[in-house]
Amino acid sequence: MTKKRFYITTPIYYPSAKLHIGHAYCTTLTDIFARYKRLRGFECYFLTGADEHGQKIEKNAALAGKSPQEFVDGIVEGFYKLWEALHISNNDFIRTTQERHIKVVQDIFSAMLEKGDIYLGKYKGWYCKDCEAFWTDTQVGEHHLCPDCGREVQTAEEEAYFFRTSNYIDKLLKFYDDNPKFLLPESRKNEMINTFIKPGLEDLCISRTSFSWGIPIRENPKHVIYVWLDALTNYISALGYDSDHPELFNKFWQDSECETIHILGADITRFHAIYWPMFLMSLNLRLPDREFVHGLLMMKDGKMSKSKGNVVDPFPLIERYGVDAVRYYLAREVTFGQDGAFTPEQFVERINVDLANSLGNLLNRTVSMIDKYFEGMIPAYQGQVTLFDQGLEEVAKHSIEQYEALLDDLKITEAIIAANEIVSSANKYIDQTTPWALAKDPAKQKDLASVMNHLANAIFIAGMLLKPVLVTASDKIFDQLGISEDLRKYENIYQFGIIGNVKVQKGEQLFPRLDQSVEVEAIQAMMKK
RNA sequence: CGCGGGGUAGAGCAGCUCGGUAGCUCGUCAGGCCCAUAACCUGAAGGUCAGUUGGUUCAAAUCCACUCCCCGCAACCA
């Protein structure tokens, strides 16, 4: 069942405005999974990117007095910076305006047209003359007003190409049945079937003539490809599908030994779970193994939106609290797969409780004691000496097992909780073994040595399990424990006691405790900007 | 009857898939410890799990039905 290679993707984000913490959420969680797989020695190809076409971009660019390309270039520059700040380890970044992508989309269109899966029809919708834009029923609302300019809209129709979904509905339903783990959480599958397929799936409109910022259709250049056939194709065009260099595509997409995983938000589930498999069927390509739908990070007063002025920009958070704290918060606070809310109070509390009080303080007190009692030298492992040694080792073993099973299943939040069990058990272990008392008794030196060794090893394991999240702090932990480069390998956590006979190197506090009221105010100030 | 998610101690959440002592973090109170980042450890108070609803069962937070309330989506805002 376990595959040896992984291909994991985020959606490609729309560069009509700056990214907010919701984008950071999705990308960070995907990154954690990619790093985890690589840490365990698997090849993992991680893709993210930008979806740069469409009317909204065309319009925003005009407003900014730029060409669409100049406009998106500027915004995408911000994407790069954010991913760099978050230490996102993507292997590639696809932009739908790149030549490598455009050609593939045009070829795919041609192939589907020839095959008869695409036909020319009429698109009917609400049209705003002033904005020269089509809108959907829900966008115009009961009063049929343009969501942009507020003027009244009229029904209108234009010539457009459609993808014939009827050819693939039965195949798709069978695919769902044959692959129960394709779409997770499972409730999403029912939603797809009940909401969209059962009532009668409409054909998908895939071209427009009302604007020009898009990939032109070769066979009929007054049309540009509209959204999803363009956007979804990124997952394979980035790998070199339909190019002179299909090596990555063969290795990470077509090879059944590679597990392909799309991470996406609930709002675009339909496109990924219904149309994308259909497109791939039409092209006779392999389908993704898993699509994982994550929840939305909401603000206390509802969904993040510019009009509410409650958008959280991740940059100042990273600047003030560090990349590890922000990544940790995103992964731990909200259960991956469910909706959650961002609040400054919870942000500060999470970091203080888990990172400062538990993990940071544990490292600090351990290193201090090793300094004090053994002149900085971690004693060698000598088996289970004190009454509590076995218990701690068992917790570590259990945590590792849990962590791996959960993370393999994309249960990232739960996996972190499993890793944290080692930390809290170690803190308790200190109180149980009372090393300061052992230190006063010459007959208890062996016990004391064992306690210090167990603590160092427990912290090593916790640090390793958290490494996909704490991209800089884990190495700082290992530095303080004096663990050499060649010992910093994931497989070493299976051998409790491997750390020993090395000199610790006390450093700065890993995560200084934050002042709740000061920091909450600071974050609130960031949100107002 | 559009679709989905949710209503569990003062706050924020887990548990519900596979029914059977209601768990975690913060806060509060009491104690311990002194290695440590006023951190760490122990204990206590506080909830009968939206519904003075119906059903299944020896037994329901957990399954079924109904009702009420909140949120998201509704065919380009992760």
Image: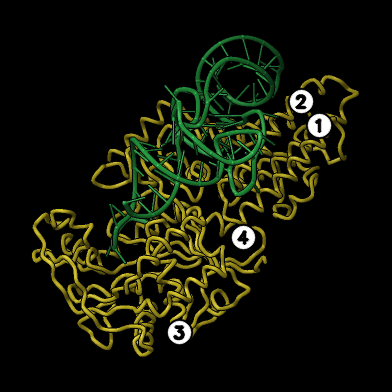
Chain colours: A yellow, B green
Which mark is drawn over residue A432? 2
Whichever of labels 3 and 1 marks the residue nearer the N terminus, that label is: 3
Whichever of labels 3 and 4 marks the residue nearer the N terminus, that label is: 4
Mark 2 secondary-structure assignment: helix
Q: Are marks 3 and 1 in one subunit?
A: yes
- Which quadrant is home to the C terminus of chain A? top left
- Determine contact: label 2, label 1, CB under 8 Å: yes
Q: Nearer the viewer, residue A117 or A441?
A: A117
- Which quadrant is home to the N terminus of chain A? bottom right
- Determine contact: label 3, label 1, CB under 8 Å: no
Q: Are marks 3 and 4 in one subunit?
A: yes
How far apart in space, not on screen, are marks 1 and 4 (Cα)?
33 Å
Whichever of labels 2 and 3 marks the residue nearer the N terminus, that label is: 3
The location of residue A133, given as percent across then percent down, is 16, 66
Which mark is drawn over residue A388? 1
Amino acid of disc 4: Lys
Quickly name the residue at label 3: A243
Quickly name the residue at label 4: A37
Q: Are marks 1 and 4 in one subunit?
A: yes
Amino acid of disc 1: Phe
Q: Residues within 10 Å of mark 2 (few under 14, many from 20)?
A: few
